[in-house]
Amino acid sequence: MKIRILISFKESILDPQGQTVKNALHTLGYDFIKDVRQGKVFELELDGISEDRMNEVVPEIAHKVLANPIIEKFDWKIIK
Amino acid sequence: MKIRILISFKESILDPQGQTVKNALHTLGYDFIKDVRQGKVFELELDGISEDRMNEVVPEIAHKVLANPIIEKFDWKIIK
């Protein structure tokens, strides 16, 4: 089974990388871009785990290992 | 309109960050994880652009600015 975890800054947190990308895109003439937020994506290939256990353990992995829960939020889904 | 662009290494490209995360997860006992690939995600807020123009310009931005097309691939969709 393959899952995708998206991690991004919480709305209230400034995203300087995203701002830099936005400014670069404006310089290139893409001025219809009002905001850019950058985040991380992890694609995990899992094997030998039940769906119930996966629903329990994936949020745990995202929360404890991949994201910084103070400033980041995550979202995940099965992709295959 | 809000879009999400996912950028990840092409399948043939080694992903040392993903490998490191996989090893860390194994150390923590999550040994059902067979592979980890890490990538970037950009969420762009667009305004004042037609859907046709967006379909033209978003791949251009992803290809020319956000991704390195030699080693990375991208995928995008409208999220709002």
Image (cartoon, coloured by chain):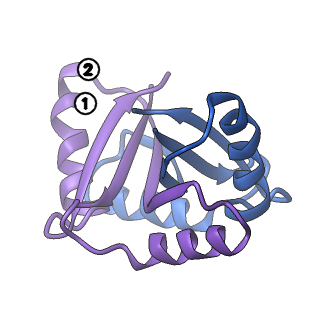
Chain colours: A blue, B purple
Q: Position of residue A16 (x, y in %)?
A: 61, 67
Q: Label 2, on which residue?
A: B51
Above or below residue A15? Residue B56 is above
> Mark 1: which amino acid?
Met
Q: How many numbered marks are there? A: 2
**What is the chain letter for disc 2?**
B
Q: Position of residue A20 (x, y in %)?
A: 49, 67
Q: CA distance from mark 1 to mark 2?
A: 5 Å
Q: Is residue A69 left or right of residue B17?
A: right
Quadrant of the rendered structure where residue B76 is? top left
Who's the residue at 57% across and 46% down the image?
A5
Above or below residue A71? Residue A54 is above
Report crowding for label 2: few under 14, some 14 to 19, many 20 or more residues within 10 A (C-alpha). Answer: few
Report crowding for label 1: few under 14, some 14 to 19, many 20 or more residues within 10 A (C-alpha). Answer: some
Quarter of the figure that contains the N terminus of chain B:
top left
Who's the residue at 46% across and 61% down the image?
B36
Who's the residue at 66% across and 38% down the image?
A54
Secondary element under disc 1, as helix, strand or loop, is helix
Q: Label 1, on which residue?
A: B54
Task: Out of A49 and A43, give the one closest to the viewer.
Answer: A49
Task: Out of A69 and A60, give the one closest to the viewer.
Answer: A60
Task: Out of A69 and B53, give the one closest to the viewer.
Answer: A69
Q: Position of residue B52 (x, y in %)?
A: 18, 21
**What is the chain letter for disc 1?**
B
Residue that lies at the very extreme toward the front in this rendered image:
A48
**Residues at discs 1 and 2 in contact (Cβ within 8 Å):** yes
Who's the residue at 29% across and 75% down the image?
B14
Numbered label attached to residue A20 = none
Quadrant of the rendered structure where residue A13 is? bottom right
> Mark 2: which amino acid?
Glu
